[in-house]
Structure formats: C-alpha cells, structure tokens
Amino acid sequence: MMTIVTGIMTNLGPILARRGEVAHFEPEPTLIRVNGTGISKLVTDSETHIGWRAVDKITLTDFGIGFVMQEGGWFIPISAFESEASMKVGYDQIVSVMASGQVGQETEHSEPRTLH
C-alpha cells in the first residue's frame, strides 16, 4: 500500500471569487491511499474509495498526478512530494500498483509531459 499526504483544495469557489468576498480559506489536509483494490481519499470527516476499474486514465504533469474517472477526477499536487523526481517515482509506483490490481483490463496511462 502507498500513502500520500497532501493539502488538496476541495472548494475552488472562494479562491476564484473576487478578493473582497473571500473571508478566509484553508486547504483541507487530505490523505491519499493507493493499494491493489483502488485509491482512497480521506479528509477530516469522510473517506472515499474508487476501485481501479473506475479509473479511466492516470497522468503525470509538471503540477502533479491526475486520475480521470467518469464521475470527475482527483489530483495529487507536486507539493505532496519532496521533489519532481520523487513525484515521478510515486507515479511509477501508482501505475504498478494499479496494473497489479487490474489484470487484463485496459487503462490508459499517459507518459509524463511538460506543460507550458
């Protein structure tokens, strides 16, 4: 099992609102767990688990690791890792765990790319 701790912002509305309308915003600490059955996201008062069969694509960008699902997506920002190199290692580990949990199922994994 792999565990990643990150501060994922759950509600972008306050950030995208006009400056005068934002009273206070704190990113919500989030614990991400990856194992052979899928990926889980644990926040202060709830946990969500997504099985690997529901993940359509996993991608690595300059900004983090993204998971695309029919219902939406999850994102692990680069700030959750010590460096870009450790994020790449984390991506490779996630892809490996994902592949081991879905023998015989096709899932798209995009190659790392540079975004401009």
Image (cartoon, rainbow, N blue to C red):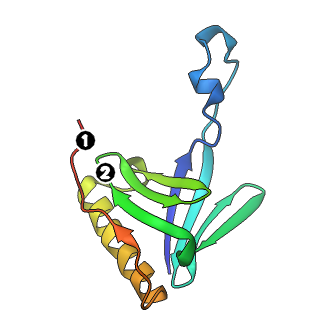
Q: What residue is rendered at 53% in x and 76% in y?
A: 52
Horizontally, is 86 left or right of 55 in the view? left
Q: Secondary structure at mark 1?
A: loop
Q: What residue is rendered at 57% in x and 83% in y?
A: 37
Q: Residue furthest bottom?
A: 103
Q: Position of residue 109 (x, y in %)?
A: 34, 68
User: Eyeballing the image, is 2 above or below 12?
Assistant: below
User: Eyeballing the image, is 2 above or below 85?
Assistant: below
* Residue nearest the observer in this picture, 77 or 108: 108
Mark 1 and mark 2 lie on one chain; the one further toward the N terminus is 2
**Circle 2 residues within 10 Å: few <14, some 14–19, many ≥20:** some
Q: Position of residue 16 (x, y in %)?
A: 57, 23
| Labelled disc at residue 115 | 1
Q: What residue is rendered at 22% in x and 52% in y?
A: 113
Horizontally, is 60 left or right of 74 in the view? left
Label 2 near label 1: C-beta < 8 Å?
yes
| Labelled disc at residue 64 | none
User: Eyeballing the image, is 109 above or below 12?
Assistant: below
User: Eyeballing the image, is 95 above or below 42?
Assistant: below
Q: What residue is rendered at 24% in x and 62% in y?
A: 111
**What kind of residue is marked 1?**
Leu
Q: Position of residue 3 (x, y in %)?
A: 51, 70
Q: Position of residue 66 (x, y in %)?
A: 43, 56
* Residue nearest the observer in this picture, 74 or 42: 74
Q: Secondary structure at mark 2?
A: loop
Q: CA distance from mark 1 to mark 2?
A: 7 Å
**Circle 1 residues within 10 Å: few <14, some 14–19, many ≥20:** few
**What kind of residue is marked 2?**
Thr
Image quarter of the C terminus? top left
Q: Which residue is mark 2?
A: 61
Q: How many marks?
A: 2
